[in-house]
Image: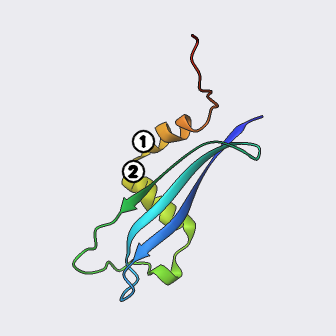
Amino acid sequence: MTITTTWSIDDLEYDPSDGFVKNAYWRLEGKNGDKLIYDRGGSAWFAKPESLPDDFIPYAKLDEATVLGWVKTAIGSELCKQWERDVSYETVKGKPF
């Protein structure tokens, strides 16, 4: 069976006065069917600018795809690819002795 990788957002930390997202808690899972093979999680922190840009999207209007885009940009494409590879194959623990 093929192992699939899935990114998701677990939670957001935001400023209630203007909806600026300060921190996104993310998760990356590798699954073989319904069986979780490996998961990795973390957070991406976003620095609040002096003034919010014209294309600013407040918390109440966000969707997961937008936030995942921000997270992946913050992590960097090479590290995202590496982590996706890391969760896309099964390993076992043990010692040969």
Residue 22 locus on image (x, y percent):
36, 71
- Residue identifier under label 2: 75
Look at label 1 and name its amino acid: Leu
Residue 16 locus on image (x, y percent):
39, 86
**Callout 2 crowding tier (Cα within 10 Å): few <14, some 14–19, many ≥20:** few
Comparing 10 with 68, the one in front is 10
Residue at 30% x, 80% y is: 52
Horizontally, is 35 left or right of 70 in the view? right
Residue at 60% x, 48% y is: 29
Quadrant, the C terminus: top right
Q: CA distance from mark 1 to mark 2?
A: 6 Å
Comparing 53 with 45, the one in front is 45
User: Is the residue 26 above or below the residue 32 in the image?
Assistant: below
- Residue identifier under label 1: 79
Q: Residue furthest bottom?
A: 17
* Label 1 with label 2: CB-CB less than 8 Å: yes
